[in-house]
Image (cartoon, grey):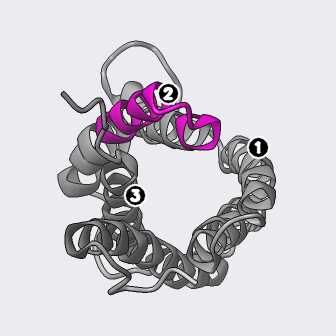
C-alpha cells in the first residue's frame, strides 16, 4: 500500500487566491464589503488554508506549514476585526492607524516568506512578492487615509490573488497530466 500523500498546496493556494481576489475587488471599489468576503475569509481563505498548512506539516514542508496556517489565521483574524465590534461585546472598531500597524507586520512576515521563495520557481515569487507589495500598499492607504492608494492596492491584490489561482491550477493540472502543461517558471 502506498503512503503517498496528496499535495495540499492547491487547496491552500485556491483558498488564498479566491479570497484575495474577492476582497480586492472590494478594495478597488467595485463592491461593498459584504457577506461574500466575510464568509470566504472565514471558511476558504481561513479554515481551508489552515487545513492545508496542517497537511503540509504531515509532508514535512515547513514553508507550506508556515505560509498556509499563518495566512489562514490572518483571514480568520481579519474577519474577527471586522465583525467583533458589531457583536455587542464592548469591543471598539480598530482605528485606521492601528490597522496600518497590523498590515505592516503582515507585510514584514510576507517579505521574509518571499525571501524563502527565491530558491523556488518564479510563480511562487510572484505570489509572495505581489502580496508583500499589497500589504504595504494597504498599510500606507490606512496610515494616510488615501482612498486612491487603496484602489491601486485593490488592483494589485486582484493580480496577486489570480497569481495564486494560476499556481494552484498549474499544480493540479500538471500532476493530473504527469507533465508540465502549465509552467511555473
User: Could you give the CA–CA distance between mark 2 and mark 3, rounded to whole angstroms?
Assistant: 16 Å
Q: Measured from the top left, where is residue 36 in percent x and y?
A: 20, 56
Q: Is residue 45 left or right of residue 35?
A: right
Q: Is residue 60 left or right of residue 181?
A: right
For label 2, the SS is: helix
Q: Nearer the viewer, mark 2 or mark 3?
A: 2
Q: Could you say which is closer to the camera, residue 134 or residue 28?
A: 134
Q: Which residue is mark 3?
A: 13
Q: Answer whether labels 2 and 3 touch (C-beta < 8 Å).
A: no
Q: Which residue is mark 1?
A: 105
How would you classify the magenta stretch by its main secondary structure?
A: helix
For label 1, the SS is: helix
Disc 3 residue crowd, few under 14, some 14–19, many 20+, Cα 10 Å: many
Q: Is residue 64 magenta?
A: yes
Residue 25 is tagged as none
Magenta-tinted stretch: 47-65
Q: Which residue is mark 2?
A: 57
For marks 1 and 2, the one nearer the N-term is 2
Q: Nearer the viewer, mark 1 or mark 2?
A: 2
Q: Is residue 87 left or right of residue 137?
A: left
Quadrant of res 131 = bottom right
For marks 3 and 1, the one nearer the N-term is 3
User: Could you give the CA–CA distance between mark 3 and mark 1, rounded to whole angstroms?
Assistant: 21 Å
Q: Could you say which is closer to the camera, residue 162 or residue 7?
A: 7
User: Could you give the CA–CA distance between mark 1 and mark 2, rounded to whole angstroms?
Assistant: 24 Å
Q: Could you say which is closer to the camera, residue 26 or residue 156?
A: 156
Amino acid at each position: 500500500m502506498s503512503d503517498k500523500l496528496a499535495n495540499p498546496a492547491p487547496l491552500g493556494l485556491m483558498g488564498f487566491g479566491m479570497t484575495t481576489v474577492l476582497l480586492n475587488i472590494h478594495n478597488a471599489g467595485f463592491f461593498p464589503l459584504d457577506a461574500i468576503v466575510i464568509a470566504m475569509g472565514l471558511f476558504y481563505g481561513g479554515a481551508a488554508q489552515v487545513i492545508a498548512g496542517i497537511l503540509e506539516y504531515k509532508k514535512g514542508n515547513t514553508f507550506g506549514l508556515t505560509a498556509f496556517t499563518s495566512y489562514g489565521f490572518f483571514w480568520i483574524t481579519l474577519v474577527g476585526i471586522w465583525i467583533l465590534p458589531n457583536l455587542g461585546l464592548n469591543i471598539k472598531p480598530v482605528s485606521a492607524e492601528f490597522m496600518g500597524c497590523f498590515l505592516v507586520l503582515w507585510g514584514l512576515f510576507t517579505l521574509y516568506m518571499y525571501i524563502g521563495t527565491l530558491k523556488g520557481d518564479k510563480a511562487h515569487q510572484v505570489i509572495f512578492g505581489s502580496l508583500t507589495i499589497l500589504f504595504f500598499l494597504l498599510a500606507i492607504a490606512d496610515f494616510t487615509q488615501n482612498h486612491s492608494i487603496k484602489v491601486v492596492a485593490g488592483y494589485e491584490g486582484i493580480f496577486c490573488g489570480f497569481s495564486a489561482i494560476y499556481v494552484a491550477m498549474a499544480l493540479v493540472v500538471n500532476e493530473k497530466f504527469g507533465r508540465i502543461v502549465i509552467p511555473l517558471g
